[in-house]
Amino acid sequence: MGSRLLPLSLVLGATLADTVGLHRVALWLVLLAIPCAAAAAFLAVSDLLDGRRAWTRAVTTSGSLVLLLVASAVRHGAAVGHAVPALALSAAIAAAVLYLLPAIFWVLQPVSLRPAQPVS
């Protein structure tokens, strides 16, 4: 349950549901993403405490968990029948960006080009 893909897909689903107009479904998707994000954050922090090099994963998953909590709290505090608060939508999108940040850095990482060694 420590995968970052599950909370990421739930957050992207909630953003898509908000875009379509299914705000109640988006509310439940954000709420469901919180325990999944907590599991990913706890796993990343425990890897860090075990001595593994997981600073990026620990910081991004913990930050995403905080942003999902903010998005859920703002969304639940909004008046029924009104538009989704901008802070709730922005926090959910920022959480998705934080989940994708390590993948973006991995893709943009420069490749070291070495000449091929002749096979003997």
Image: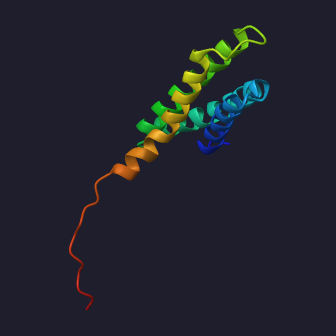
Q: Quadrant for the C terminus, please.
A: bottom left
Q: Residue at coordinates 20% horizontally, 75% vertically from top-left? A: 115
Q: Residue at coordinates 28% horizontally, 54% vertically from top-left? A: 110
Q: Residue at coordinates 39% horizontally, 50% vertically from top-left? A: 106
Q: Quadrant for the N terminus, please.
A: top right
In this view, the residue farthest toward the bottom is 120
Q: Measuring from the top left, give residue 105's x and y in whole percent.
A: 38, 45
Q: Count the marks: how many? A: 0
Q: Measuring from the top left, give residue 9's x and y in whole percent.
A: 65, 41
Tell which of 97 and 43 is nearer to you: 97
Q: Quadrant of residue 28?
A: top right
Q: Measuring from the top left, give residue 87's x and y in whole percent.
A: 57, 16
Q: Is residue 117 above or below residue 7?
A: below
> How was this image coloured?
rainbow
Q: Quadrant of residue 119?
A: bottom left
Q: Is residue 83 left or right of residue 70?
A: right
Q: Is residue 40 above or below residue 30?
A: below
Q: Residue at coordinates 78% horizontally, 13% vertically from top-left? A: 81
Q: Is residue 48 left or right of residue 27?
A: left
Tell which of 8 and 37 is nearer to you: 8
Q: Is residue 74 left or right of residue 32?
A: left
Q: Quadrant of residue 90?
A: top right
In this view, the residue farthest toward the left is 115
